[in-house]
Each structure stands twice: as C-alpha cells, then as structure tokens.
Image: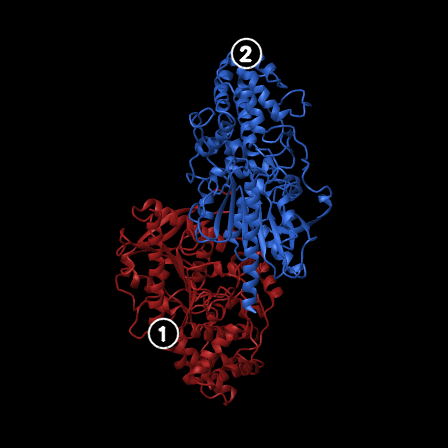
Chain colours: A blue, B red
C-alpha cells in the first residue's frame, strides 16, 4: 500500500451517533467491542422486532434472479395509524442493531411524530449478505455493493411495509441517516422523492468527491479542533512526525519508540509509515467524537476528549524524546483511558459492527473521496491526493478500479437545487463538515450548523450535557419533519 | 405464444414523428423500408455529424469493465456559444438516424433557441450494440438493456460533450423524446435534474403500468378514432372477428379467406389467431398515425387514413363474406395504398430501423404494460390481461421474468409532483394518450393536449396541413423551453 494508506484510511465514515472508528480500508485499528450506549434507555434492545425482507440481489438487471434476506428493525410503540408517520433509517456500512441502538434521536422524537421507526440494514453489512459467507470472496460477488442497489433496497422495503402493514400505506415516510447513512438519506430523497417526503442527512459529506471541496478541508478542521484547546497542541503533533522520522533511523531509536509508545510489537523501519498513519487516524477519530460528555464506544473516553489529549501537548518546544513521551500520554487517553490496556497495537482489527471489507470495496469503486494534507494549514505530513496510486491499490486488492466522477454524475454534485425537503446538519467540530452542505441551498434544502457538535451529535440521544447548539439543531430538525408530515397530509386531503 | 400475442404486440411503442409500427414482441408486421420524410429538408442528412462515445456496458457495477461505442448525432449549425442551448434527443428503441430525420420539430426550433442538436442512440439499438453481433444472444448479454442504463449513458454523454466542446459547459440542456423516448426524457429530468433543465415528453405513456390507468383505455381510444369517421366503422370491425371465426371452421372457408384477403401464404386454422392479431395491429397502427397529411413511412398513406379506411366499413349489417371483402379493402389502404403489393403477408419482419428484439426483451423485463379489451367498449375480441401467461412466455423466449411493479418503484408512478419542468404532450387521437399525463400536475409539470393529434405529431416537422391544435402545442412547447433556458441563465448570473 505504501503512502496510500493514510488516504484510504480517511475514506472511512463514522457510524451515526456512535463510533469513534474510521474504518481503514487496508489497515485497522483499536480493540473494539460491541459498544454499549450509556445514555440509551436500558431496555431499548427489547423495543424493536427483527425482521427480514427478500430482496433481489440485482435490481438493475434481470438475469440474476437470486434474492437475499435484508434485515430490518421495526418499532411501533409510538406509532399511530391516525396521523402517524414512518421514520426510516437508511442504514450504512455496519450492523443495523448497532446503528439502531445509537440513534437515540429517532427514539426521542417517535412519540411526538406518532412514528413507526424502521432501521434498514445496508446490503453487504451485518446479516444482510447477498451471498452469505461468500459475499466478499471476489469482485464478482461484490458487484452488487453500490449505493444505487442500496437505495433500491430501501424503496422496495418501504413499498413492502406499506403493502403489508395496515394503516401504513397513506403515511409519510422520512429518511434519516448519519455519515454515509446521511448521504444515503439525502440521495434517497433526491432519487425517490415519491417514496420519502423528506430527509434528515446528518454529517453527510455529499461533496467530499472530485474537486467539489478542497481536499485539504478535512484535515484542516481536525487541526483546528486541536488548536482550539491550545495553539501548542497541533504544533506538537506537527513536530512529532519529524521526531519519529529521526528516531526511526537507528535500531536504538526504533526500540526506544516501541518502549515509549508501549507498542505490543517491536517496530521495524518498515512499520514507520503504518505507525504514523495509525497516530494520524487517532487524531482524526478524536476530532470526530469530540463529544461534550463521556462516551464509551471504542474505549471509555472523557467528555471533550481533545481537551484532555491536548493537556499533554501544550508545549511543542521540547526535545524529540520528550515530545514523543507526550504523544504517548495523548494516545493513551484515547486507547487506554480505562487503564486496562497492557500495550497499544497499531494493527488491530476494527469492531465487527462495522464492515471494513465492504467499506474498503465501496471506497475503491463509487465512494472515492480525495483527501490531502500540506503540513502548513494542517498538522500532518504533506501528502498529495494520488488517484493513480489509489486506483492501482484498489485493483490489486479487489480487481476493480474506482470511477471518481460517477457519484457526481449520479447524484448531481453541487447542482442539486431542484430537489427539496432535505435538512443537512453538520457539526463544526466534525472534519466531515468540510465535505458537507453547510449553507442553505434553497428554502427547502437547508443547512443546520451545530457549533459545538462533532460527527452527527444531533442523531444521538438527548443528554444532560448536550450544548445549546445541538438542542437547537434537534428542535429545528423536528420542526422540518413536522412540516413535511403536515404538507403530506394537507396534499392527501386536497386529493380527496 | 397463443393468445398472449396481441397483448405483447401492443407493448411496442412508436418511433417519434415517424413510424406506423407497433414493434410486436413475438411477431412482426409489414414490409418496411428506411422511411423517407417528404416534409423534411432535402439535405437534412448532411447537416449532422455522426460520432461515437465510449460507454461502460454496466454503469451500476464495477466487475465488468467492458465498454462499447454509443453512436450519437450532432448538429451545431444554429448553435451559439453566447446564450445558446443544447437540445438532447433521448433515443428510443431504434436507429438514431431514423429518429433524427423524423424529429423535424427540433430542427425547426434550433435557430430560435440557438441550439445545438444532439441525438443519442439507445443502447442495444441501431449501431450501439454493447456486445456487437452477440448482443441479443442470451439474457446474459441482454442484462444491460434497461432504462436505467440508458439514462446513465445519456448523463455520461452530456458530461462528455460539456467537457469537450468549448462553450457548451455553461449551457442548459433540454431533453426531448417521443413515445418510449418521451418516457426516457421525462424520467431523465426526474432522475438527473442536474443534467437537464427540463424535458419535453411527447406521447409518453409513463402511466401505462400496473393499474395506474385502466388496461382497456388504449383500445377504447383506437375504437373511438374509428367511430369518429362513422359509427358503422368500428361495428364492422367488431363483427369481423366472428365472421373470420365462422369462416375458418372449414377448409373452404380458409381458402376463401386467403383469397379474399390476398394473403401471400394459405391460411390454416392455426393461423387464425395470428391473422386476427395482425388485423388488430393494423387498426392500432392507423390510430397512431392518423396524421392530417399524407405520409409514407410504412407504405404511402393518405391524409387522415382512418377516414379513408372507414369509407369501406360504413355498413356493418352485411353478410360475413361482404364484410370481409370490405375489411380487405380497408387493410389494402394501409398495406397497399401504392397499389404495388402483390399480396399481404401476415408475418413479415418489421423495419430494421426499429429493434424488435431489443424491445421484446424490454417488454419482458421492465416495460410491462398491461392491455386488455372487453369487446363492448372497444371493437376487439375480449381479452384479459394475464400476467402469469405473459411471464411464462417471456421466460420461454428470454429466460427472464418481468417485474411489473419495478417501473413504478423506480420512477414514482402517479406520485411525481415533486419534480419540475416537464411538458407532457399527447394527441387525443393517439391511443397511447390513455397511459399519458393529460392533466397539469403542477405549474411546472404540465400537460398539453393536441385534439387533432395522433402519436407525437408535435415532434414532426412543420407541415402546411398541420391543424391549429398542433401549432398551438408547438408554440407552448417552445415557450416552456425558452423559459427553462432563461431560468438557467438567470440563476447562472445570480451565482456570479
């Protein structure tokens, strides 16, 4: 992989309201367990039914008649046949139970919207595997892993629900999703406006493609997040790369690094790229989950974790060895807040809740997101976006080549003003906001900015430590959803 | 095929501004030649360039990397870089040169709109064959013949033109099409509103699916067209089926029928279904091309051909033999107006300009249009729509089964009010208007009805015998196109 790793790794997106994971395409991270959400209701898991719907593997061709079972979760506790609605989570790259348990916002508004909640699993993730255990075998089996097929699954599933649940037929459906799920929610409204009356696309970087936004934007925001704690913090990180480079030129230096960073496996000089990518990824993760309250997804993390991390990195003007000792302290906040870890592993696999294989394939085909750094406006080593190298890596791994402009052809890029009823929410702390819609496009394509929000904080359950900005965002989101529902019923009445 | 033939045969759509063809799925019709359009400019064929664009065979998967050459025609005679526009014909099921030469409307308005004209050939038709001579070999090769792939071709082609033709990038593109091409134009605007600012969908039966319109509507309109000439005319035709049935019970009767109808091959009792389907198809064709002036597409036809045909069918109260002699006279108007035909052939192949194989596959997969007759409100033998039988026939022929509700899932059925800038035009004489949009849906989804129009008369070149209703329709269409172009430039200016 060489230097492509950092960029590939940045392609990964976060699970809504949950993970501190970047799912790296070709390397992995952290020792993860099924996350438990301390703020969700204790018996939440009992509140939904798990169901399966028979989907065509290929919606866009007629030769392959094979079907598979798509998993979805449904909760009708607060649903009312009279004047109710359906909130439909457009599942993204992971286990849908995990998304369901970590999208507290939907549970919080269900009663007020008299809403049925549906969480649809994305094909090739969780249990929804088109070819079972062979689903990731080769590019032939992966051929049906695209956003278009996923959207068609959602459309067919909603048709099925309306056909089979008495009272559901004449109710408005709203799509909701975060991160890649937010992109899907927005795209779903764009492509199937006859199926959903509106979409809440939380932290959805729909413009992180081609040159729609500068490829530097993402890492600049990460850097800004660290700079807010103290100006010395990003400067320490920027200097750490040179320090690592200098130390890694000798055997003694490598050994010192291994011990200082408490790494599980001894470093060799060929590991240095991976080490630096792994550290970079940690800073990125922290920026994404810089939440205002303690959370325990990957590991237990304190409230505002970047502030805690930056306590160790205030002073950049220290020796290489002291700097890297400080870096270790900072990493330790993220990887060992509980104090249980014996050592840090730079190549551990990611949580089984997120489908890293599937995502790696998607990043190598449709979801081609350019990232770059220049080392000046950001705290990382300079790195250009190299499509050729990226494409060759993809071809080596999957036997496919990315089509970087396809998403723009399909979903319109910045030219989306003819659509309607989409709320794009973004947290200003979230690096993904750099590829998101952060200004109103029209009266009905609106942007909500959450100044104190990290990655789709708004989709998370209500929490006593929520800042005012996310409370306001949720209030606005609820208001838009109510408007879409009212408009639906008004036009229904006009037709009768 | 049995009794499914008539219904399958009705699935075929007409080429814009041109053909008198129903492309039957499993049987064919008429002795066709490359039509010459007497009303088009003599040197029209010299006014465009023929070009080819490399398209992915599969836009929706990444395994198959194969490409093919899509043919398109382009004329920039009237195009202006300053304030110009691009009129894009969304090619349907046939040779694009033929469509180009028979869509005079685009040529007539090019100068006023400073428009570049582009005619894009639909994959699997004309020269645009994804697998060359093997394209129709089996369902595996036909797998990429769908409306979704065709729309993606159009989007990619327009992107290519904007990228490569200096001055084209910041110009509005309008989609135009007739019949299935009109459906594609409308769907293109719905699915790719970022690519085309509006669409003129002429005689596009986008609702001829599932139960969106009564399956009887189509044949009722055919019948009404004949009734307008004289009430006895449809009654004669209705009685003719019984007469044929009675005569075909004996050998002598079959021989008499063969001679009276001047058939090329002697009838056997097993041909009777085909004979009646062929005759029915003739009446349908006449309804579609009941144009106000002489045309010579299939065969030379007089102006208002149904009036001419019905002269022979005024009196239904005659003997079986006289009735069928009259039917022959009527058929002879259609098949032998020139007086050149020595005999009539009920199983001749259709024009090579229309891809009957491709269409048969499309009718067996996505474009599943239910038709039926009851023999009371229409002049045909009663026939129910039988999906099971239809599906079995498709499986026998192509190894695929239709998905009758897919088009509605994909394109929204009657629930399309959130879209904008589509003009649906329909001729009241055209049986396809029964499946078309004939009432305004919103201010920007508008219906234009042409009271004296048959199948997309409005797309044909200006003609001195054009009735006032089609002149008005074209005026309105031009006005809408100008508005879309103006809105495009207005919003472009606002952005700068």
- In the displayed structure, B471 sits above or below B78; it is below
Circle number at residue A253: 2
Question: Which dot, 1 or 2, sits closer to the camera?
Answer: 2
Q: Which residue is mark 1?
A: B469
Pick the residue in front: B483 or B164. Answer: B483
Pick the residue in front: A150 or A309. Answer: A309
Pick the residue in front: A377 or B373. Answer: A377
- Distance from label 1 to label 2 (Cα)? 88 Å
Disc 1 and disc 2 in contact, CB within 8 angstroms:
no
- In the displayed structure, B362 sits above or below A183; it is below
Residue B285, image x, y percentages:
44, 72
Q: Indicate the quadrant containing the C terminus of chain A: top left, top right, bottom left or bottom right.
A: bottom right
Residue A298, image x, y percentages:
64, 31
Label 1: which secondary element: helix
Pick the residue in front: B258 or B180. Answer: B180
Q: Is residue A402 visible?
A: no
Chain to which mark 2 belongs: A
Residue B442, image x, y percentages:
46, 64
């Amino acid at each position: 992989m060489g230097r492509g790793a950092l960029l590939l790794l940045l392609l990964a997106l976060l699970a809504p309201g949950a993970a501190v994971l970047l799912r790296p395409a070709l390397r992995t991270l952290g020792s993860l367990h099924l996350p438990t959400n301390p703020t969700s209701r204790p018996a939440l898991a009992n509140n939904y039914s798990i169901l399966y719907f028979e989907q065509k593997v290929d919606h866009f061709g007629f030769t392959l008649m094979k079907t598979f079972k798509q998993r979805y979760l449904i909760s009708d506790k607060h649903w009312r046949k009279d004047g109710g609605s359906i909130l439909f989570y457009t599942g993204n790259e992971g286990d849908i139970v995990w998304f369901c348990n970590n999208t507290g916002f939907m549970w919080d508004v269900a009663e007020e919207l008299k809403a049925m909640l549906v969480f649809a699993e994305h094909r090739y993730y969780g249990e929804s595997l088109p070819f079972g255990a062979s689903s990731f075998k080769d590019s032939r089996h992966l051929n049906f892993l695209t956003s278009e097929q996923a959207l068609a699954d959602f459309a067919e599933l909603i048709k099925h629900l309306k056909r089979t649940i008495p009272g559901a037929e004449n109710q408005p459906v709203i799509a909701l999703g975060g991160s890649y799920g937010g992109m899907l929610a927005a795209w779903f409204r764009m492509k199937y406006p006859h199926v959903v009356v509106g979409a809440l696309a939380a932290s959805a970087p729909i413009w992180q493609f081609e040159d729609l936004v500068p490829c530097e934007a993402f890492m600049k925001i990460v850097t800004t997040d660290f700079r807010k704690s103290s100006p010395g913090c990003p400067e320490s990180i920027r200097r750490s790369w040179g320090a690592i480079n200098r130390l890694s030129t000798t055997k003694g230096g490598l050994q010192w690094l291994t011990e200082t960073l408490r790494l599980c496996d001894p470093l060799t000089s060929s590991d240095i790229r991976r080490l630096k990518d792994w550290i970079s990824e940690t800073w990125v993760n922290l920026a994404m989950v810089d939440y205002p309250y303690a959370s325990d997804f990957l590991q237990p993390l304190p409230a505002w974790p970047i502030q805690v991390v930056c306590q160790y990195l205030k002073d950049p003007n220290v020796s290489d060895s002291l700097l890297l000792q400080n870096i270790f302290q900072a990493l330790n906040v993220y990887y060992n807040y509980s104090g249980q870890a014996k050592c840090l592993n730079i190549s551990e696999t990611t949580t089984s809740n997120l489908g890293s294989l599937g995502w790696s394939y998607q990043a190598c085909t449709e979801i081609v997101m350019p990232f770059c750094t220049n080392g000046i406006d950001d705290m990382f080593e300079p790195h250009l976006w190299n499509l050729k190298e990226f494409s060759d890596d993809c071809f080596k791994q999957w036997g496919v080549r990315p089509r970087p402009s396809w998403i723009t052809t399909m979903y319109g890029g910045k030219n989306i003003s003819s659509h309607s009823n989409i709320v794009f929410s973004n947290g200003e702390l979230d690096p993904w906001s750099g590829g998101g819609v952060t200004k109103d496009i029209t009266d009905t394509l609106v942007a909500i900015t959450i100044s104190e929000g990290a990655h789709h904080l708004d989709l998370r359950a209500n929490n006593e430590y929520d800042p005012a900005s996310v409370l306001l965002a949720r209030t606005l989101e609820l208001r838009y959803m109510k408007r879409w529902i009212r408009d639906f019923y008004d036009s229904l009445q006009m037709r009768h």
